[in-house]
Image (spheres, grey):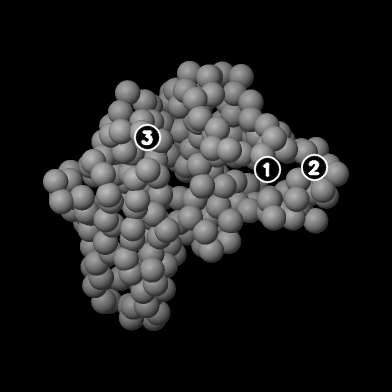
Amino acid sequence: ETGVTQTPRHLVMGMTNKKSLKCEQHLGHNAMYWYKQSAKKPLELMFVYNFKEQTENNSVPSRFSPECPNSSHLFLHLHTLQPEDSALYLCASRRTSGGYEQYFGPGTRLTVT
Amino acid sequence: GIQVEQSPPDLILQEGANSTLRCNFSDSVNNLQWFHQNPWGQLINLFYIPSGTKQNGRLSATTVATERYSLLYISSSQTTDSGVYFCAVEPISGGYNKLIFGAGTRLAVHP
C-alpha cells in the first residue's frame, strides 16, 4: 500500500466505448502523473499535473483526456481507443520543489478489443 | 534529453546468489530512485538515492553522481526478488519535476 489508489484495476473496452480511469492519492502531494507501460517497453510519461495545472503532455493522442479537479484526484478519460492502446496505466504522485520521492499506484490493466 | 541505461537487461540467479545492477545516466540529476516491479505490475519504492550509499536489509544502493551512475546490490537473493528493477532519474535541466525511466533489468531467481 503506497498511499496511491487506482480504479478499476482491470478494464476491457471496445474501440467505440468511453471509460475513465481514476487515481487518488492520500499523501498530501501536489504533483500527479500518468504513465503508460506497454509490453516489453519502458514506462512512458504521458501527463504531468502540478497543483491541478497540466505542466506536461508528451504528445499523447487526443483520445486520452486527463482531468485533475484537485491535488488529490486524477482521471484519464478514454474514448475511441485502438488495440495498440492496450497497456498498464500507472498513476504516481510526489511533492515537488525537487528532491522528493515519487510513489506509484497499482495500475489499471487496460485491454482494448 | 537525458539517457538512462540499465544493465544487464536480463539476469538469472540461483537462490542465495548475490548480484549487482547498474544504472548509467547521461546528465546531472536532482533525484534518482530504484523501483521493483512485481509480477502484478506494482512499482515498489526501493531507494531514493541521488547520491551516497543506503542499505535496507539485503538490498543496498550506491550513487556516484559525479560519475553519473548508480548501483543496486542484492545479496542472498530469494525467489520473491524476481521481477523487473527500474532506475529512474529527475534531470536537473529540461526535466524538472518528472522521472525518466530506464528500460529495466528483468531478474529471475530460481530455487
| Residue B23 visible here | yes
Above or below: residue A40 compared with residue A93: below
Q: How many C-alpha atoms fall within 10 Å of the one at disc 2: few (<14), some, or many (≥20)?
A: some
Number of the label disc, if any, that sits on residue A33:
none
Subunit bearing disc 3: B
Amino acid marked by disc 2: Thr
| Residue labelled with disc 2 | A80
Counting from the top left corner in percent of width and height, residue A38 is at 58, 56
- Residue for point 30% across, 28% down: A98
Q: Marks 2 and 3: in contact by CB < 8 Å?
A: no
Q: Relative to B67, is A21 on the left or the right?
A: right
| Residue labelled with disc 1 | A8
| Residue labelled with disc 3 | B95
- Residue for point 68% across, 51% down: A85
User: What separation in Å lies between label 3 and label 1 (alpha carbons)?
Assistant: 30 Å
Q: Camera-side residue: A32 or A54?
A: A54
| Residue B87 visible here | no
- Residue for point 45% across, 27% down: A31
The picture quadrant where one finds residue B9 is bottom left
Subunit bearing disc 1: A
Q: What element carries label 1?
A: loop
Q: How many C-alpha atoms fall within 10 Å of the one at disc 1: few (<14), some, or many (≥20)?
A: some
Counting from the top left corner in percent of width and height, residue A20 is at 72, 36
Quadrant occupied by the C terminus of chain A:
bottom right
Q: Do the residues at pointers 3 and 1 share their chain?
A: no
